[in-house]
Amino acid sequence: MAEAAKLSVEGKDLEFPVLKGTIGPDVVDIGKLYSQSGLFTFDPSFTSTASCKSTITYIDGDAGILLYRGYPIEQLAMQGDFIETCYLLYYGELPTPTQRKKFQYDITHHTMIHEQMVLFFRGFRRDAHPMAIMVAMVGALSAFYHDSTDIADPRQREVASHRMIAKLPTIAAMTYKYHIGQPFVYPRNDLSYAANFLHMCFSVPCEEYKVNEVLARAMDRIFTLHADHEQNASTSTVRLAGSSGANPFACIAAGIACLWGPAHGGANEAALKMLEEIGTVDNIPAFIEKVKDKTSKIKLMGFGHRVYKNYDPRAKILQASAHEVFEALGVKDDPLLDVARELERVALSDPYFIERKLYPNVDFYSGIILRAMGFPTSMFTVLFALARTVGWISQWKEMIEDPGQKIGRPRQLYVGPTQRDYVKMESRA
Ligand code: CMC
């Protein structure tokens, strides 16, 4: 590709540098476009815009490839675990045995939340959506951990990051317990990250609860697969919030709010609701017809992706994981799994979906697994937020540590009224 891109505006020729990444498309650096031409670019949903340089995650949507710091997601999910994935995303390299031990110790010893925060839960209605509670609780961390909100101090940034990776499972589990009216269960330092989370969610004080290893492994894999995903809507939200100098707890709360939407993290909840609505395999053809009818506005939830125009690599891993979980739980037949499999088969052979390159995404199978584990659908996006926290925090750290970092400030194409004079009330018709 050329080293410079040329643009001709009203007879004036302008040249812009073309920047090369290590892999992936080159980008045209239009940072000086406005000062040289008086023009802005117009790309409302950022379909052609790179908002930053990053070394964290790479996606090739056409080939169905996802890399964290260069490592394929399949290898990390199947051979590694979530704790080392957190280390990798945050520090840039896989940990040595000593680094891993220390990191695991640090995360494990930050899992409790300030006891006064426990009182906050009482202020929420029991039927509040768990994501509403998450946004509030994570934002509230900034009211309790003042010693890690100075973003100019690298050690404070690190402590805040460790705190969030450690405390999100505790807050998520408490949110779940509050929702179902059971007592909170405190974290256990002798359990792995995923096993501790399952223990906090599903144990009760009146009896012993032994974490099923297969379920803990599946949970760990779900966390790993959701840990980061480049500059998606919630990550961009975290970066934009952080670009103003806001503290990291507030930035992650902003990310959680953005993730809530059904076109983003809320899709796993919506996908499972859709499978339940379809109910049985016989109802699939009629449902597919409704999806294809543009006037119905119905989408096949868990299908399609802004970046993947091929099979989402995360969906493949979860499809296999679903079988392991079902076997471990002794579930022989689950009508929803039958509906999911058949829906996938029909969609992948239908020209509507083939032409538009609509493949199952990560949310299509994660919901089925989480439901089998015993989570209600309203918790699905919470689990996504828990897993994505390390990605958000790594992206936030990368942005803060960039010496050229400035506040983000998109511009606009104004199409409203031009200047006009105020009209007194008595003169308005
Ligand atoms: N079902 C039916 N048709 C679809 C779907 C779908 N799930 N997704 C896209 N289309 C159609 C869309 O109507 C359009 O058709 P046409 O060209 O005839 O107008 C075409 O495919 C292109 O769609 P688009 O809206 O331009 O694609 P997008 O890149 O803007 O949207 C998406 C991506 C994820 C918002 C969308 O595919 C969608 O809403 N999917 C369902 C929700 C979902 O599963 N989201 C989870 C994404 S993965 C988790 C995450 O990263 O947050």
Image (cartoon, rainbow, N blue to C red):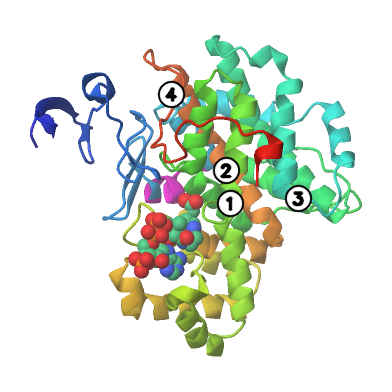
Number of marks drawn: 4
Callout 1 amino acid: Gly
Q: Nearer the viewer, residue 69 or 261?
A: 261
The mark that comes first in sequence, 4 or 1, is: 1
SS state under label 1: loop
The mark that comes first in sequence, 4 or 2, is: 2
Write down which quadrant ligand 1 falls in.
bottom left
Residue under circle 2?
258
Q: Position of residue 349 (x, y in %)?
A: 34, 79
- CB atoms at circles 2 and 1 under 8 Å apart? yes
Callout 2 amino acid: Cys
Residue under circle 4?
398
Q: CA distance from mark 4 to mark 3?
A: 32 Å
The mark that comes first in sequence, 2 or 3, is: 3
The mark that comes first in sequence, 4 or 3, is: 3
Residue drawn at (81%, 49%), measured in percent from left and top?
A: 177
> The magenta stretch spans which residues?
74-81
Is residue 132 depicted above or below 365 in this figure? above
Q: Residues within 10 Å of mark 2 (few under 14, many from 20)?
A: many
Residue under circle 1?
261
Is residue 367 depicted above or below 94 in this figure? below
SS state under label 3: helix
SS state under label 2: helix
Residue 165 seen in the figure: no
